[in-house]
Amino acid sequence: MKTILSEKAPRILKNKKRLEKKLNIKISNRGKEIQINGKPEEEYTAEKVIDALNFGFPFSVAISIKEEDLEFEILNIKDHTTRKDLERIRARLIGKGGKTLQTLNQLTKCNFELKDNQMGIIGSPEYLENAQESVISIIKGSKQSNVYSHLEKNQIKPVIDLGLKE
């Protein structure tokens, strides 16, 4: 049994039935505490999915962690810069009308969400490292166009399934 503290408990409880069905677990709550019951490996993926929901990802993206074997990572902006004007850094990450996030999303095949001074990334393990590097370089001050061209040059080849995966 795992216990998770959640600020967005109502959002998780709203999707409780769907989460229990898709993740093969039982969810119970007491206030902001959410308890997960199930097999250890299912509890682990459920914890990742609930963390993604807490972070602010939509339900369809968060549940893809289980369905498509994706990873969820959180980058702390303060770990990669000494600047004090974090609003400007967040603005650079979002871009005009969300264009930077949208372009990063297309080039890295990962989903991004910005919350406070943290960037959440959900993606395939092969693409996650590229996505993290691109976000870190924008935080450190690289031009968006340079990051885009670097991502285009260093596209990761899709993994060919040999039928070994279930």
Image: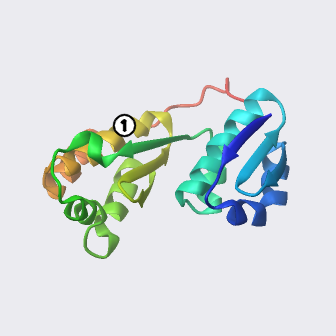
**Is residue 129 found left or right of 144 in the rendered image?**
right
Label 1's element?
Answer: loop
Residue in view at x 53 percent, y 31 percent: 160
- The three-letter code of the residue at mark 1 reads Ile
Q: Residue 163 or 45: which is nearer the viewer? A: 45
The single residue placed furthest to the bottom in the displayed view is 97
Relative to 72, residue 117 above or below: below
Residue in view at x 77 percent, y 28 percent: 40
Relative to 134, residue 42 above or below: above
**Is residue 110 found left or right of 56 in the rendered image?**
left
Residue in view at x 17 percent, y 46 percent: 140
Mark 1 nearby-residue class (10 Å; few <14, some 14–19, many ≥20): few
Q: Residue 130 or 119: which is nearer the viewer? A: 119
Is residue 42 visible in the rendered structure shown here?
Answer: yes
The single residue placed furthest to the front in the displayed view is 31
User: Which residue is label 1 attached to?
Assistant: 156
Residue 53, x across and y down, in percent: 61, 56
Residue 100, x across and y down, in percent: 29, 63
How many numbered marks appear? 1
**Is residue 74 found left or right of 28 in the rendered image?**
left
